[in-house]
Image (spheres, grey):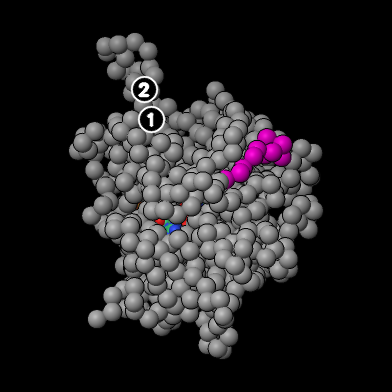
Amino acid sequence: MADATTRKYDVIVVGSGASGGWACKRLAEAGLKVALLEAGRPQSDKNFTEHKPPFELKYHNLSAALIRKTRPIQSIFDICTEYNYEWFLNDLDEPYTTPKGQPFQWIGRLRMTGGRTNVWGRVSLRYSEFDLKAADYDGFGENWPISYKDLEPYYDLVESYVGITGMAEGLDHLPDGKFQPTMPLTCQEVQMKKGAKQKLGWTVTLSRSANLTKPLHGRTACHYCGPCERGCQTHSYFNSAFTTVADAVKSGNCTLISNAMAHQVLMDTETGRARGVQYVDRETKAVREISARVVILCAQTQESTRILLNSANRQHPNGLGNSSGALGHYFTAHVRDGGGSGEMPTFGAQPSMSGPRRPVGIYVARFRNLRNGPKSKTFLRGYGYEGGTDLDFNWSAPGFGNSFKKALKEPRAGVNVLGFGEVLPRWENFVEIDPSVKDRFGIPVLRIHMARSANEDAMVKDMADSAGELMEAAGAKNIRTFAGPPTGRWAVHEAGTARMGNDPQKSVLNQFQNLHDVKNVFVMDASGFPSNPCQNPTLTIMALCVRSCDHLLDEMKRGNI
Ligand SMILES: Cc1cc2nc3c(=O)[nH]c(=O)nc-3n(C[C@H](O)[C@H](O)[C@H](O)COP(=O)(O)OP(=O)(O)OC[C@H]3O[C@@H](n4cnc5c(N)ncnc54)[C@H](O)[C@@H]3O)c2cc1C
Ligand code: SF4
């Protein structure tokens, strides 16, 4: 009997995260035979620990030094803990390099079925026509080769399947979606929402979030336990591992091949078409090949571009699909170094150690450089805030004995916001192969060039100033704001490096995320984004991926691919 590698496939999908999960589901359910190559291990409900108290862990979740030994970069983000650190890659096994003086912290690198959706923050926001055509408005960069109308039906489809709690707000620049019933705002958030609208004209809303408030496709509604980044046994948040990938496998048409680290796309030099993918088995280090009619890369922005760059050959000397020279360039992420906090009235509420804990925060919609508003004199584009309120005991109460106990029980209500801002897509921010370093599997690694620019510095300053205004409008006391200091650039919302466009001389992919240069290779993650609007990207990654899959199915039916 043929093993998984020698079977006949129509399509190879590389990566099982937000994009790869959808590609597998859409194509396998349409009847195509799909091989899913995933560098990580299989995920299972048995790994989920959302209800486990820290004292049941070997090091009581106080083991920062232990985690830093193998994950010095991944553990910079506080969601990588003793509970879940083994889901993240080992930074020593899979390094990358940066030029001197330009650090970039590439965090959120998962090696499990489901990729980053295992631990993501779940904020799910649509882009608007204004975002997709931003270059028309301020002259910077390129417009997207599609419009909101092209994406809208796919946003509807994805949201209806994923399940997103949210409030309709009727904003042109942050379109409403197909929401499940909203989780309630706290009293402090209601006061902030009113104050922000009345005094500033800004919109504060519940973060639109991929957490269920009513059952959907066999998944139950959220029961407010809190730490979704440790998994969810009731499948109440969206994680590709137990949604899209599970559906694809259930169709009988998708074979998940785990621990398969794709190295390069294999080309047929006579036809100029891809014939398959070469990968390394992470457990045995054996080099394997797998064949199909179509290759779809969904390995996450930098990783997919790394595979294309590592696929250079005589016909594509600078990387596969790089006749434009744009591959690797226009790398963007979000900047998130400015914000503020304050204290709000408690409205008589009492804190509780045992919950409930709403796993969703608040979102403040972009209010700078809007189509009909004034233009900022110091920066282009804009930012939104993520934030929340917390009601807690007064842990910093002074004293001891009975008076301390009494003071401790005096509740405190805090409110905080953190800006997430657009980083402009610039040629000089790019990734390339470092010719002198390989990972543990013998695959050349990336060198990442990401510099801070004056536009982002000005934006971060504005994030802090405006956070102060917002806190005042909300009626907060003890207001504090922060901006910077400039640290190594990092984010988990990376995009660009293989941008889409209509002109093959300036872009790598067409509007269906298909390489201009190779008819049967697609890149369906955020690599193709021509810009990185301030809204979190994953909802758009998923909607765009499904749209591209539908195009691929049409082309295959017509015999064009
Ligand atoms: C902590 C955190 C919070 C976040 N919060 C939000 C949020 O609130 N909202 C939002 O929109 N986005 C958020 N994101 C970002 C979001 O998770 C990503 O945008 C999204 O998951 C990207 O999808 P993807 O398919 O491109 O990649 P991923 O979901 O990362 O999946 C890529 C998969 O490819 C696999 N892979 C990589 N290289 C190879 C290879 N060579 N061969 C085979 N397989 C490979 C990986 O193992 C991984 O499983 C967050 C991310 C993190 C880490
Ligand atoms: S808070 Fe809700 S979605 Fe998150 S782990 Fe708990 S039940 Fe699941």
Q: Amino acid at mark 1?
A: Asp
Q: Position of residue 544 (x, y in %)?
A: 56, 67
Labelled pair 1, 2 in contact (Cβ < 8 Å): yes
Q: Which residue is mark 1?
A: 392
Quadrant in the picture for residue 95: top left
User: Closer to the camera, 24 or 461?
Assistant: 24
Query: On the picture, is 141 further left or further right than 61?
Result: right
Compared with 29, 57 (above or below) is above
Task: Report the magenta residues as a range.
Answer: 448-457
Does 536 appear in magenta? no
Ligand 2 within 8 angstroms of badge 2 C-beta: no
Assess disc 1: are there few (<14), some (14-19) or many (≥20) residues with their C-alpha within 10 Å of its C-alpha. some
Q: Say which quadrant the C terminus sits in.
A: bottom right
- Residue situated furthest front in the rendering: 314
- Say if the magenta span includes residue 453: yes
Residue at disc 2, secondary structure: loop
The amino acid type found where label 2 is placed reads Trp
Res 337 visible:
no
Q: Residue at x 78, y 58 (%)?
A: 136
What is the x, y in percent for residue 80? 37, 41
